[in-house]
């Protein structure tokens, strides 16, 4: 048995040597691509190209790797490649260990330089002031709906959505206390308390002081320093701040998911499986919204989301945030845009993320 094990290990070593050689060859080509992009000042991050590669690899895959494994491996390869081409900073709604940080790392990898920001507005500002090239912020949750601050800032900013990331949200209950009867206060983000209401009730914690903070990562940090306290946070945040997890997956709905967007200042090329986001500013007149939406129907455009927001502009009562299938350069999309040049603010066209 030992001889067979050693033989198999030698085979693994030989394959690893081949992988290393091939990865280095890939990076040499990447460097050549980076030189061309630098001359033309083209963006390094091309999510539509990355998804094209992933789809091709998944299609020809014969196993035993599954699609998720292929995605995890190659997303990290893409991240290393981008950093080799041109290192660029990524701002995110922090602190370190937040769900937004995890979403950012899932696309930009462990090697990227990250800039935590105290607020969503600070993420926008970091890109606009060129302190970061990209920004990652939440835009909606499957339970709590849209993030109003993100939509409002998209309405004011010239930054564009260049990618989206869907991430399952699982909460843990972490504390220095071994017995939950000793816990006098719980830290978390306000939304997380609502998402874990049943757990709090089942463990007689609804009367404990609930203290909302900016993020679940900050909750873990505070609870790690304070006896008789606890945090509702992610497993990663608990590990980061060295606070024991007493209960995992305490959210009421285990299919809870948050959609994050990647912001930057460039336009994606069409990928063939795109989504476009817009803000529509319509006059406060009977039938205005119906007539506007009918133009999408006539152009055979599939709307996937519509959400109203109170308008800050005195000439409008509401703005409408709309997602639909297609790219801004598609002929049928251009047809609608030309009919409504003053009403539509284009927020970005980008390859659809995996929301499964």
Image (spheres, helix red, strand yellow):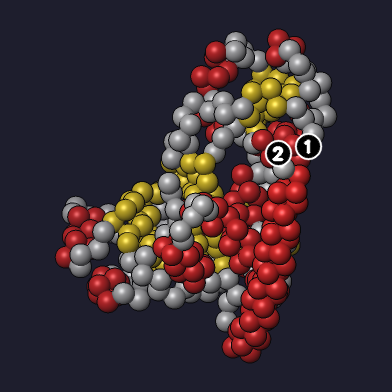
Q: Is residue 165 left or right of residue 124?
A: left
Residue 217 visible, this orientation: no
Dot 2 and dot 1 residues touching (CB under 8 Å)? yes
> Residue 260's x, y, as percent?
52, 52
In this view, the residue in front, 84 or 338, is: 84
The residue indicated by pointer 2 is 237
**Relative to residue 58, is residue 216 depicted above or below?**
above
Q: Quadrant of residue 313?
A: bottom left
Element assignment for label 2? helix
Q: Quadrant of residue 99?
A: top right
> Residue 7's x, y, as percent?
72, 54
Q: Is residue 120 left or right of residue 227?
A: left
Residue 224 visible, this orientation: yes
Quadrant (top left, top right, bottom left, bottom right) of the N terminus? top right
Q: Which mark is residue 194?
A: none
Element assignment for label 1? loop
Identify the residue at horizontal 57%, vertical 29% (top origin): 249
Rate crowding at label 2 as few (under 14), some (14 to 19) or many (20 or more) other CA atoms within 10 Å. Answer: many
Identify the residue at horizontal 69%, vertical 58% (top origin): 12
Identify the residue at horizontal 57%, vertical 81% (top origin): 42
In this view, the residue in front, 283 or 47, is: 47
Q: Which mark is residue 241?
A: 1
Q: Quadrant of residue 206?
A: top right
């Amino acid at each position: 048995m030992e001889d067979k094990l050693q033989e198999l290990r030698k085979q693994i070593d030989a394959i690893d040597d081949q992988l290393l050689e091939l990865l280095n060859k890939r990076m040499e080509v990447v460097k050549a691509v980076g030189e061309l992009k630098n001359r033309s000042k083209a963006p390094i991050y091309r999510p539509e190209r990355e998804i094209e590669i992933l789809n091709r690899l998944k299609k020809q895959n014969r196993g035993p790797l599954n699609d998720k494994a292929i995605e995890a491996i190659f997303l990290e390869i893409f991240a290393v490649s981008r950093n080799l081409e041109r290192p660029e900073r990524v701002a995110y709604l922090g602190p370190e260990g937040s769900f937004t940080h995890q979403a950012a790392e899932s696309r930009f990898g462990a090697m990227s330089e990250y800039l935590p920001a105290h607020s969503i507005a600070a993420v926008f500002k970091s890109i606009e002031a060129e302190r970061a090239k990209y920004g990652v912020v939440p835009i909606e949750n499957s339970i709590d709906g849209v993030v109003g601050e993100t939509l409002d800032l998209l309405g004011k900013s010239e930054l564009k959505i260049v990618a989206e990331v869907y991430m399952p949200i699982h909460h843990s209950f972490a504390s220095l206390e071994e017995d939950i009867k000793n816990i006098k206060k719980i830290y978390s983000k306000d939304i997380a308390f609502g998402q874990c209401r049943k757990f709090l009730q089942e463990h007689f914690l609804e009367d404990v002081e609930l203290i909302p903070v900016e993020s679940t990562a900050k909750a873990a940090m505070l609870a790690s320093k304070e006896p008789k306290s606890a945090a509702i946070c992610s497993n990663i945040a608990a590990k980061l701040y060295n606070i024991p997890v007493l209960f995992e997956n305490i959210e009421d709905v285990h299919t809870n998911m948050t959609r994050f967007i990647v912001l930057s200042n460039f336009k994606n090329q069409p990928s063939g499986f795109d989504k476009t986001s817009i803000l529509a500013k319509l006059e406060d007149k009977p039938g205005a919204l119906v007539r506007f939406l009918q133009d999408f129907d006539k152009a055979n455009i599939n709307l996937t989301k519509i959400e109203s927001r109170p308008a800050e502009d005195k000439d409008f009562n509401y703005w409408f945030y709309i997602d639909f299938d297609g790219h801004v350069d598609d002929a049928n999309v251009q047809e609608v845009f030309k009919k409504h040049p003053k009403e539509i603010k284009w927020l970005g066209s980008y390859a659809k993320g995996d929301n499964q």
